[in-house]
Image (cartoon, helix red, strand yellow):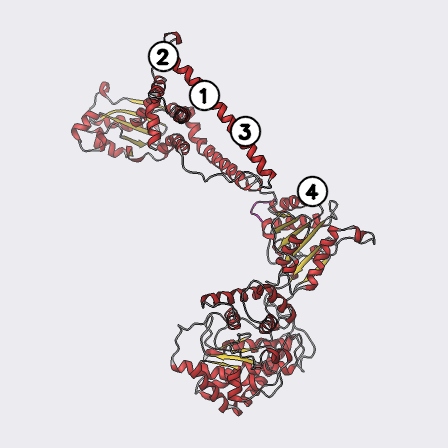
């Protein structure tokens, strides 16, 4: 900043700019004078930049010449002398000054030659970098706030100052009423002149008289102006004549009134100036955005596709070897890649490549991961885009982006397009127009454009479309038909073998000394219903827990704690229960544990605890489903409902009153019994019928008498499970007390503790359970899947019942 002021002092300020600034200070500047300011400021900025360049060059090449600064200073000062001296003939200038000018011209020629040499060297270096495989020149240094930025802000301030002063006049202008004018100024003879300007009257005062009468008032300031508004000129003139007549002012001495107009230039500038400034600002912002983010980021680039292109040069590190637990889906996708790589292998038999495939399945099962592996393995261009990127607030943008995406894909054919979360634009259209659940014509136009591009007159067989969604049931039928998405690939949660393979992939990066086969098998048995994303999260949590404990390697106990945290949440040891509440929770969980131990078809018990965990769970009992079950019998469902009611029945047997801790248990039992009656045909009265129960339907699809029968059957099933549970717990009341008191003492009981307290379980375990949880491996920590909470309605449901979502423990 100091150098800029110093340079301004050296070159001098133009006399014209001084006059305009002085007039602006006294508020005598006109609009034409204000419009001259940007032009003068631009010339001054150019002279400052030229002066700074010359000064730097003199410093670099003539630092050994004393007095060079004085010479250049005197030469630049002469440029600001009056025009009469500037126009003198060169023959009258001193001879030494002519020699200095010739030396200066010679120096400029040398500088230009050196700059050309530097540019040539830079070009040679860039060519060498390109030959060595480097992409482009090194990144430019970070931009700093230099002198040019200061000059830019100065010019902008000079341009915007007139508008600011007009819109925000500040403390130099004040509006008064006619009564104030009459009382304070007119009656005291202080008004010198009145100027009428388009509905306003400017009051010019006698400053000397005002200064004498009001020495401390702002009115004595020559820059201060009063004005008042008028309705019409005729009314103003009549009121002024009446006032002067009342004051007895003769006609020859009355206050002069003049009329002025703003001028055409001022009116146009005030009318269109803000609009032009806004348009200019938008154009500047659009240009900056277009330069930084590419053409699709500019103001007119909304219709361009935002798809990212990947090819064999792009660093996509995911390969098919990183994808596990979905062997069938991986084979299907690899076939698409093989067809694009070697189409003649299929074409010789007359086969055609499928136009597209849709990947569906629960969240976290690896649909996007499989697409990323396709991008990393395929040797053809791969375009990735999200379905939500086609949706904008502007009409026609979605369809335009679809057209641009497929046009770009055809230019790069053969290629693959992957649209993630396609349900954002591919929802089913209703019969009355629009989309199911609400929508508009813009989204429908986008969907129609996708339908046309995938199977229309301009369709290319060398462009394959892959799509991913969690909701294939809501997609439009026209989008799902053969010819567009020929293959529907469902990726379900992995089985026991699939979970073991996924654990092997993620454990390859973990430092552990455990036996890999036993570790992966045990963890896979502990995590039924886990998707690939859940497994990755559990492995990462185990590494974090081991690092938090300063362990050298990640051990089995860390993995078990990680799975427990992922499923049940963080332990809330800070939540302190009263002795009565703690005793109630202990007997509640003991009831669950006894039912799970003595019912034949109940899942094997792993751990029971009264330590609060997660959001509101005061206690929980942990079970391990016996393998990946896909079918369940009536006996299994009844035993599991009875086990779920064990907490409430235990409270009834041991306390005079019951608590609210079993609310989540009742919700699970009711939902399971309703599903048995309405969907699984396990009611003798209703028979093998399926009754829809959609909450969005206004009317039930069955008669009121049928609804009453359903309610009665649900009540019968729940009562039967309650009776079965109460008979068992009444006979095992002593064992409940033993387990509950041990829980109060230790807070956590494992399967080995229950064997010690209750004896071995009567019913034989399945192979997967006995292999990893027979009590002889020395592993005491067990994870909480699934969980029976005491009072947590938001507890995660057991993933093992994905096929039967209402059959929960």
Q: Are marks 3 and 1 in contact (CB under 8 Å)?
A: no
Rendering quarter of residue 741: bottom left
Quadrant position of the N terminus in the picture: top left
Q: Answer whether residue 136 is magenta in the image.
A: no
Quadrant position of the C terminus in the picture: bottom right
Mark 2 or mark 4, earlier in chain: 2
Residue 772 percent location from the top left of the image: 59, 77
Instruction: Decide if residue 713 is in sight here.
Output: no
**Gap between marks 2 and 1 measured at Cα:** 19 Å
Report how many numbered discs are placed on residues in the image: 4
Q: Answer whether residue 393 is magenta in the image.
A: yes
Q: Residues within 10 Å of mark 2 (few under 14, many from 20)?
A: few
**Gap between marks 3 and 1 measured at Cα:** 19 Å
Q: Are marks 3 and 4 in contact (CB under 8 Å)?
A: no
- Say the numbered circle drawn on residue 120: 3
Name the secondary structure under disc 4.
helix
Mark 3 or mark 1, earlier in chain: 1
Q: Are marks 2 and 4 in contact (CB under 8 Å)?
A: no
Name the secondary structure under disc 1.
helix
**Gap between marks 3 and 2 measured at Cα:** 37 Å
Mark 2 or mark 1, earlier in chain: 2
């Amino acid at each position: 900043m100091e150098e800029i002021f110093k340079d301004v002092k050296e070159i001098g300020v133009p006399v014209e700019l001084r006059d305009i600034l002085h007039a602006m200070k006294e508020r005598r500047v006109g609009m034409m004078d204000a419009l001259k300011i940007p032009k003068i400021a631009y010339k001054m900025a150019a002279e400052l930049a030229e002066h700074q360049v010359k000064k730097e060059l003199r410093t670099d090449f003539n630092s050994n010449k004393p007095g060079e600064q004085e010479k250049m200073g005197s030469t630049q000062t002469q440029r600001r002398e009056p025009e009469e001296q500037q126009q003198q003939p060169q023959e009258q200038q001193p001879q030494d000054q002519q020699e200095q000018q010739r030396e200066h011209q010679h120096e400029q020629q040398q500088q230009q030659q050196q700059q050309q040499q530097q540019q040539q060297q830079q070009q040679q270096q860039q060519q060498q970098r390109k030959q060595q495989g480097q992409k482009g020149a090194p990144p430019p240094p970070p931009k700093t706030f230099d002198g040019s930025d200061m000059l830019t802000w100065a010019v902008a301030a000079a341009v915007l100052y007139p508008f600011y002063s007009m819109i925000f006049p500040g403390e130099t202008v004040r509006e008064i009423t006619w009564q104030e004018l009459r009382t304070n100024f007119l009656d005291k003879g202080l008004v010198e002149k009145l100027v009428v300007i388009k509905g306003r009257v400017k009051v010019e005062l006698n400053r000397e008289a005002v200064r004498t009468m009001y020495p401390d008032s702002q009115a004595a300031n020559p820059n201060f102006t009063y004005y008042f508004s008028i309705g019409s000129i005729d009314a103003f003139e009549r009121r002024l004549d009446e006032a002067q007549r009342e004051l007895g002012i003769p006609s020859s001495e009355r206050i002069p009134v003049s009329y002025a107009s703003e001028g055409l230039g001022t009116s146009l500038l005030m009318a269109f100036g803000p609009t032009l400034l806004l348009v200019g600002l938008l154009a500047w912002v659009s240009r900056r955005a277009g330069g930084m983010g590419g053409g699709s980021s500019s103001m007119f680039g909304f219709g361009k596709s935002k798809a990212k292109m990947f090819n064999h040069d792009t660093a996509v590190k995911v390969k098919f070897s990183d994808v596990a637990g979905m062997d069938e889906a991986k084979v299907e996708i690899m076939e698409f890649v093989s067809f694009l790589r070697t189409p003649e292998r299929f074409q010789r038999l007359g086969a055609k490549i499928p136009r597209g495939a849709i990947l569906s399945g629960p969240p976290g099962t690896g649909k996007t991961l499989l697409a990323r592996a396709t991008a990393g393995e395929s040797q053809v261009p791969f375009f990735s885009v999200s379905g939500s990127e086609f949706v904008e607030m502007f009409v026609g943008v979605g369809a335009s982006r679809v057209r641009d995406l497929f046009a770009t894909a055809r230019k790069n054919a053969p290629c693959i397009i992957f649209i993630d979360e396609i349900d954002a634009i591919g929802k089913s259209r209703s019969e009355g127009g629009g989309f199911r659940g609400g929508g508009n014509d813009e989204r429908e136009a986008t969907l129609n454009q996708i339908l046309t591009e995938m199977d229309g007159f301009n369709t290319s067989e060398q462009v394959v479309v892959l799509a991913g969604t969690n909701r294939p049931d809501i997609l439009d039928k026209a989008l799902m038909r053969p010819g567009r998405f020929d293959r529907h690939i469902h990726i379900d949660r992995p089985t026991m073998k699939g979970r073991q393979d996924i654990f092997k992939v993620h454990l390859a990066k973990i430092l552990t000394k455990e036996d890999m086969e036993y570790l992966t098998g045990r963890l896979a048995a502990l995590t039924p219903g886990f998707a690939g994303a859940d497994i990755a999260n559990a492995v990462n949590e185990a590494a974090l827990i081991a690092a938090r404990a300063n362990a050298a390697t990640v051990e089995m106990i860390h993995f078990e704690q990680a799975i427990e945290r992922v499923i049940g949440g963080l332990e809330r040891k800070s939540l302190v229960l009263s002795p009565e509440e703690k005793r109630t929770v202990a007997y509640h969980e003991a009831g669950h544990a006894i039912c799970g131990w003595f019912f034949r078809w109940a899942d094997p018990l792993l751990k029971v605890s009264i330590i609060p965990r997660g959001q509101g769970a005061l206690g929980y009992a942990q079970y391990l489903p016996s393998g990946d079950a896909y079918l369940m019998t009536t006996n299994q469902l009844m035993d599991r409902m009875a086990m779920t009611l064990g907490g409430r029945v235990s409270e009834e047997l041991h306390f005079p009153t019951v608590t609210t801790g079993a609310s989540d248990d009742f919700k699970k039992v009711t939902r399971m019994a309703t599903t048995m009656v309405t969907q699984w045909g396990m009611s003798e009265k209703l028979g093998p019928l399926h009754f829809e129960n959609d909450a969005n339907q206004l009317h039930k699809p069955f008669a009121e008498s049928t609804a009453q029968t359903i309610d009665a059957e649900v009540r019968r099933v729940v009562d039967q499970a309650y009776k079965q549970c109460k008979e068992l717990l009444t006979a095992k009341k002593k064992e409940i007390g033993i387990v509950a008191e041990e829980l109060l003492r230790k807070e956590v009981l494992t399967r080995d503790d229950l064997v010690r307290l209750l004896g071995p379980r009567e019913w034989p375990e399945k192979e997967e359970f006995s292999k990893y949880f027979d009590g002889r491996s020395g592993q005491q920590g067990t994870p909480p899947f699934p969980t029976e909470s005491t009072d947590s309605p938001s507890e995660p449901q057991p993933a093992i019942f994905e096929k039967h979502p209402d059959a929960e423990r």
